[in-house]
């Protein structure tokens, strides 16, 4: 068992958890989407202060590497890499979509063990970041960007029960014609769901390269221009 600090900055919520011997002993979060760079370091410091008071040694630091917010991913992973290097401890990187799948497993009250899990993160317009997992977290479809259509996930309609999770699922609910679906749009990446995975990765020595690990965006970053700025620029033409 290990003492692991988990960091998630991939969505509107910035969250940190400290897991000791498989149990969460501290959890902190901020739901202000514009506040990640300000609150993350104090959250981490508070967790580290706890380890010092309890005489614990931090064994690893875990961060979500993507997909998710471009800025958020850089903030979280950069701090985690700095901690791993400075403390000479392993770095663990996790998929936001797999973390969401764990969140479904913990949160779905009628869990029977034969569900198919489809986490979806909103990627603007009708596009999402998504993947498909079975009830043991085995990957059925690898993480990918997808433009949603009524034909999306037709191959899953023979599954007994499909759980669509995340803010991207809201856009798909009106398109999906299958009757075997459960919708959990409130499930998003969060540090409280990371512990089971980071502990597993630690036991299996599945560590990331501190120097070369990078955010997994899944698609190229695209800047947007506000309508006001766009109109002002057009007025000058």
Image (spheres, rainbow, N blue to C red):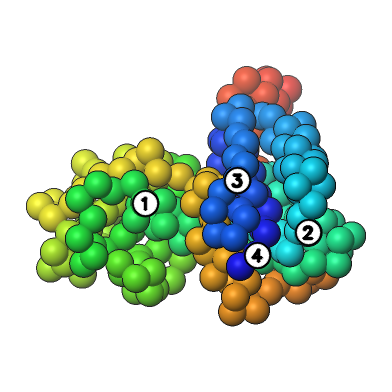
Q: Say which residue label 4 marks.
A: 2
Residue in view at x 13 percent, y 64 percent: 160
Q: Earlier in the sequence, mark 3 or mark 2?
A: 3
> Could one spot residue 145 in this view of the protein?
no
Of pointers 1 and 2, the one earlier in the residue sequence: 2
| Labels 1, 2: front one | 2
Task: Tell which of 128 and 22 is nearer to you.
Answer: 22
Q: Write the residue at 49% across / 51% down.
A: 193
Circle 4 crowding by C-alpha within 10 Å: few under 14, some 14–19, many from 20: some
Cβ–Cβ below 8 Å for labels 1 and 4?
A: no
Compare residues 79 and 217 and report the one nearer the observer.
Answer: 79
Q: Earlier in the sequence, mark 2 or mark 4?
A: 4
State which tag comes first along the sequence, 1 or 4: 4
Residue pictured at 65% horizontal, 79% vertical: 205
Drawn side of residue 59 relative to residue 121, left or right = right
Q: Could you classify mark 1 by the number of other residues whose Cα lies within 10 Å: few (under 14), some (14-19), or many (20 or more)?
A: few
Distance from label 3 to label 1 (Cα)?
Answer: 17 Å
Q: Is residue 32 above or below residue 97?
A: above
Q: CA distance from mark 1 to mark 2?
A: 28 Å
Residue 70: percent from left, percent from top:
65, 48
Residue 157 at x, y percent in the picture? 15, 64
What secondary structure is marked by label 4?
loop
In this view, the mark in front (3 or 1): 3
Q: Residue 166 location, x and y as percent?
A: 39, 45
Q: Which residue is mark 2?
A: 57
Q: Which residue is mark 3?
A: 25
Q: Image height check: is 177 above or below 137?
A: above
Q: CA distance from mark 3 to mark 2?
A: 14 Å
Q: Quadrant of residue 15?
A: top right
Q: Which mark is residue 59?
A: none
The residue labelled by disc 1 is 106
């Amino acid at each position: 068992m290990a003492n692991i600090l988990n960091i998630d900055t991939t969505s509107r919520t910035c969250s940190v958890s400290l897991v000791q011997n498989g149990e969460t002993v501290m959890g902190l979060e901020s739901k202000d989407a514009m506040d990640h760079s300000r609150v993350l370091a104090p959250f981490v410091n508070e967790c580290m202060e706890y380890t010092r008071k309890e005489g614990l040694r931090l064994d690893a630091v875990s961060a979500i590497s993507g997909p998710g917010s471009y800025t958020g991913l850089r903030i979280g992973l950069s701090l985690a890499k700095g901690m791993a290097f400075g403390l000479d401890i392993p770095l663990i990187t996790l998929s936001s979509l797999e973390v969401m799948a764990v969140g479904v497993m913990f949160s779905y009250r009628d869990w029977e063990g034969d569900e198919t899990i489809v986490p979806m993160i909103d990627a603007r317009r009708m596009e999402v970041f998504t993947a498909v997992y079975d009830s043991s977290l085995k990957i059925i479809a690898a993480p990918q960007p997808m433009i949603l259509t009524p034909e999306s996930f037709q191959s899953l309609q023979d599954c007994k029960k499909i759980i669509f999770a995340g803010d991207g699922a809201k856009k798909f609910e009106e398109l999906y014609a299958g009757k075997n679906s459960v919708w959990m749009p409130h499930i998003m990446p969060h540090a409280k769901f990371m512990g089971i995975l980071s502990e597993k990765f630690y036991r299996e020595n599945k560590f990331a390269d501190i120097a070369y690990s990078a955010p997994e965006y899944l698609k190229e970053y695209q800047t947007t221009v506000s309508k006001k700025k766009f109109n002002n620029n057009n007025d000058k033409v």
